[in-house]
Amino acid sequence: MRFIYFLLLLTFIAVVGVFAFQNSDQTTVQFFHWKATSAFSVFIAGAYLLGMLSGWTVIGFLKRSLRGVSAAPVQRNV
């Protein structure tokens, strides 16, 4: 099974490499007054990493709230 995962990883890396090679044209991105010029593949990689980061934080929030809901209630002495 590890061999299959390794082949999938190599295939993914090859596809990403071909994408980066074929999309090396300079692209300008503008956000309000901020401008950045770089290869298109760099912007795609940045968007992918930001998506991973935001997905990771959402999963973390969901895990913490599920733990809070499923935890035993705290008994208070009144």
Image (spheres, rainbow, N blue to C red):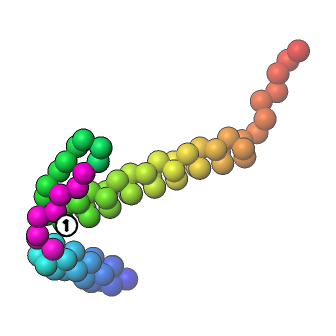
Local crowd size for mark 1, using a 10 Å CA cut-off: few (<14), some (14–19), many (≥20): many
Q: Is residue 28 above or below residue 24?
A: above
Q: At numbered mark 1, what does the secondary structure look like: helix, strand or loop?
A: helix
Quarter of the N terminus within the rendering? bottom left
Q: Residue furthest top?
A: 78
Depth check, front residue: 74 or 54: 54
Left/right placement of residue 62 relative to residue 17 reads: right
When asked about the image quadrant of residue 4, the answer is bottom left
Q: How many marks?
A: 1
Quarter of the C terminus within the rendering? top right
Q: Is residue 75 above or below residue 46?
A: above
Residue at the spot x=33%, y=79% of the render? 5
Residue at the spot x=82%, y=27% of the render? 75
When asked about the image quadrant of residue 46, the answer is bottom left
Residue 13 seen in render: no
Residue at the spot x=64%, y=44% of the render? 65
47 falls in the magenta region: no
**Overall secondary structure of the magenta section:** strand
Q: Position of residue 6 (x, y in %)?
A: 27, 79
Q: Position of residue 51 (x, y in %)?
A: 39, 57
Q: Type of residue at label 1?
A: Ser
Q: Position of residue 30 (x, y in %)?
A: 24, 51
Left/right placement of residue 23 relative to residue 51 reads: left
Q: Residue furthest front?
A: 33
Left/right placement of residue 62 relative to residue 4 reads: right
Residue at the spot x=68%, y=41% of the render? 68
Which residues are the magenta region? 23-30
Q: Position of residue 18 (x, y in %)?
A: 16, 80
Left/right placement of residue 41 relative to residue 50 reads: left
Reading the image, the residue beneath label 1 is 41
